[in-house]
Image (tube, rainbow, N blue to C red):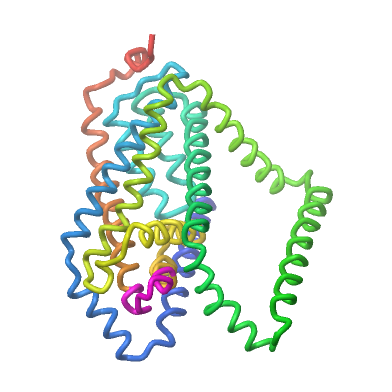
């Protein structure tokens, strides 16, 4: 009962944050601007939403095949269909609560493929480590290639408002640099204090173990039997992620001219929003709107496009996840006997 109440409270908390960001963005809009958003959603070409959903399904299929490669060194070879449905159900679970998806998909393989939970969960940590590394590399690539546009955005949206508010004047650059240095030193000092004072607490150990698992996941890649296929799947997954955002640009006339550079920016900054708020509800469209400001897209148009991208990804997860939940027990109904003797069939000899 306590766990159920806790899950409901966590879900309500993230939903509340999402609603807050919707209100935060919409509160200063005029009636005309709100009408522009709804009009953009109304006239959008939803064919491109279907294309984005198809690309998303391909990325999840590739993720399932990559996950199989990670399990091979342990001697397991689960069926692709089960792994694919486990991935889809995992994404569905993650819409509700953080990290629930990783637990769910590993539990599915334990039940239907007789793979020990702790072993499959270790491969999930490796997956998360690789995806985080890829994300960081893409983030710095974006900063390097789009530095000019980002500098304009920072100047117009952050630096100039701060300059007007605090009256930096001609010494603004000096104060800004000094502020950043003090902030960096404060951060380093805080980390040292936290390490010394709280290293014996359960919360500290939890974060330490998470970091340790991240590093262990990276090291486990040396045991992969098909490294080139693993790399190919990783590249394919992120290319599909990029295209999932990019193709939705064509659904609106005002964004159809944007290139892959804008798609990469939406992918990176939008992913940050999904990390901050579970499922990205509310915050994702706002981040897309701010991101596309860099590419001279009106805020209302960018906001509408953000909802289209978010909706395409969320609808895909909901439909595919629910379908997998219904199909999984039917598909496996006659696959294994009650003794679990067929587990050997899924082990590489």
Horizontal and vertical percent position of residue 32: 30, 90
Q: Position of residue 151 (x, y in %)?
A: 54, 70
Q: Position of residue 329 (x, y in %)?
A: 26, 34
311, 59: nearer the viewer: 59
169 shown above or below 329 = below
Q: Is residue 56 above or below residue 169?
A: above
- Residue 299, magenta (yes or no): yes
* Residue 27 seen by the camera: yes
Residue 339 seen in the figure: no
Q: Position of residue 284 (x, y in %)?
A: 41, 65
Q: Is residue 285 left or right of residue 250?
A: right
* 161 magenta-colored: no
Q: Residue at x 27, y 57 (%)?
A: 315
Residue numbers of the magenta segment: 291-303
Q: Main secondary structure of the magenta part?
A: helix
Judge left or right: residue 255 versus residue 121.
left
Find the residue positioned furthest to the top. Answer: 349
Quadrant containing the C terminus is top left
Q: Please tell me which residue lies in front, 20 or 254.
A: 254
Residue 236: quarter of image: top left
Query: Is 202 or 144 nearer to us in this picture?
Result: 144
For the point 26% across and 58% down, the residue is 247
């Amino acid at each position: 009962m306590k766990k159920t109440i806790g899950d409901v409270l966590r879900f309500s908390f993230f939903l509340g944050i999402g609603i807050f960001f919707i209100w935060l963005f919409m509160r200063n809009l005029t009636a005309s601007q709100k009408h522009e958003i709804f009009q953009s959603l109304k006239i959008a070409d939803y064919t491109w939403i279907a294309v984005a959903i198809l690309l998303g399904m391909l990325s999840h299929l590739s993720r399932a095949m990559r996950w199989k490669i990670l399990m091979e060194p342990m001697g397991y070879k689960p069926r692709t269909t089960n792994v694919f449905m486990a991935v889809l159900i995992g994404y569905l679970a993650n819409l509700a609560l953080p990290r629930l998806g990783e637990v769910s998909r590993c539990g599915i393989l334990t039940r239907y493929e007789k793979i020990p939970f702790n072993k499959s969960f270790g491969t999930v940590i490796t997956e998360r480590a690789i995806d985080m590394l890829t994300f960081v590399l893409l983030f710095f690539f974006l900063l390097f290639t789009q530095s000019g546009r980002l500098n304009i955005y920072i100047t117009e949206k952050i630096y100039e408002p701060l300059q007007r508010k605090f009256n930096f004047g001609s010494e603004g650059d000096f104060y800004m640099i000094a502020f950043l240095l003090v902030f960096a030193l404060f951060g380093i000092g805080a980390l040292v204090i936290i390490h010394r004072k709280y290293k014996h607490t359960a919360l500290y150990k939890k974060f330490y173990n998470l970091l340790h698992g991240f590093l262990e996941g990276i090291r486990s890649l040396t045991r992969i039997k098909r490294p080139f296929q693993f790399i190919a799947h990783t590249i394919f997954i992120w290319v599909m992620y990029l295209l999932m955002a990019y193709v939705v640009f064509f659904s609106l006339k005002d964004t159809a001219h944007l290139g892959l550079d804008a798609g990469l920016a939406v992918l990176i900054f939008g992913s940050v929003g999904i990390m901050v708020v579970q499922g990205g509800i509310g915050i994702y469209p706002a981040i897309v709107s701010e991101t596309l400001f860099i590419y001279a897209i009106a805020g209302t148009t960018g906001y509408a496009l953000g909802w289209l991208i978010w909706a395409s990804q969320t609808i895909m997860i909901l439909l595919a996840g629910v379908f997998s939940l219904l199909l999984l027990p039917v598909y496996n109904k006659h696959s294994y006997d009650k003794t679990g003797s067929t587990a050997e069939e899924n082990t590489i000899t």
